[in-house]
Amino acid sequence: MTFDFSTTLLLNYTLLLARSAGFVVFLPLPGLRGFPAPARIVLAALLTGLAGPLALGIPDARVILDNPAAIWLLAQMMLAEAALGVGLGAAVALLLEAFGLAAQILGFQAGYSYVNMIDPTTQVDASILNVMVALLSSLLFFAFDLHLHLLRAWFASLAEWPLGSFSTRPIDALRMIQLGGVVFTTAVRLSFPVIALLLLIDLTLGLLNQINGRLQLLTLAFPAKIIGAVALLYPLLLTAPRLFHDLSERAYEVVWGLVQR
């Protein structure tokens, strides 16, 4: 069997496409989830073509294709490349999920889940609070230039991990799990003051209703919760950029931990 440069080039571009596809699947760009599947495929192909001249991969395809277990080696390398791309995209996607989780907790407790609308980022029904917080996190994503840092990390991975050389490490999975814990902690920190206020409203109205049963104050619990949540959300939103910045630093520690050897 004869091998030429085109075979080696095809193998390198196949591995690069696997890394690009894994990266695009979890790419946290606002509105990308609403794109049809062919648009994502085209985006992955364009990213592959753009980064192709910078990718330093396998110098000779004969090293792999002459091996009796060539199909298994190719499958292993493609899965490893896809895992690297997924890790880079998922680490930053968790950053935006912190605010979505906080909005979900607040919306259910304050009663905002009774009214739904179409979320422009996901094209699904969501409460008004979820939509507002999703748009806020998208604005902060671009305000902090996180899309540029993410692309810089992805291109840096081509130099740190040449095509076919990446291998998953236990430390990477541990960092991702720790980032998930930080995301949950951030969501709780953002929603806990409002939840505490709503609990105080329930306790106060319940106590007054027990003192005088004729008042029927429990019927005021629903509007009181909505008004109280709106009043407390304003000072909490002022702290959102700081929380977003702190969480983005943790997310990019995971990203650069994947990129660096």
Image: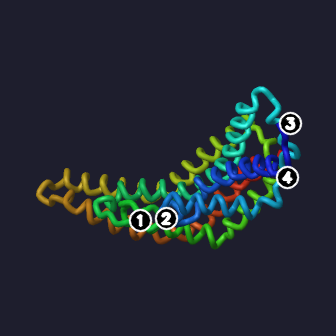
Q: Nearer the viewer's eye, disc 4 or disc 3?
A: 3
The amino acid beneath tag 3 is: Val
Instruction: Answer with the quarter of the image where residue 241 lies.
Output: bottom right
Q: Find disc 2 in the rendering and name its residue.
A: 134
Image quadrant occupied by the C terminus: top right
Q: Find disc 4 in the rendering and name its residue.
A: 56
3D distance between C-alphas at marks 4 and 3: 16 Å
Q: Nearer the viewer's eye, disc 2 or disc 1?
A: 1
Q: Find disc 3 in the rendering and name its residue.
A: 63
The amino acid beneath tag 4 is: Leu
Indicate the secondary structure of the residue bearing disc 4.
loop
Q: Position of residue 97 (x, y in %)?
A: 53, 55
Q: Nearer the viewer, residue 128 or 77?
A: 77
Question: Which sits earlier in the primary sequence, circle 1 or circle 3?
Answer: 3
Question: Which sits earlier in the primary sequence, circle 4 or circle 2?
Answer: 4
3D distance between C-alphas at marks 4 and 2: 38 Å
| Mark 2–mark 3 CB contact (< 8 Å) | no
The amino acid beneath tag 2 is: Ala
Q: Position of residue 75 (x, y in %)?
A: 69, 36
- Say whether residue 236 is left or right of residue 66: left
Q: Which mark is residue 119?
A: 1
Question: Which sits earlier in the primary sequence, circle 4 or circle 3?
Answer: 4
Q: Position of residue 172 (x, y in %)?
A: 72, 41
The amino acid beneath tag 1 is: Asp
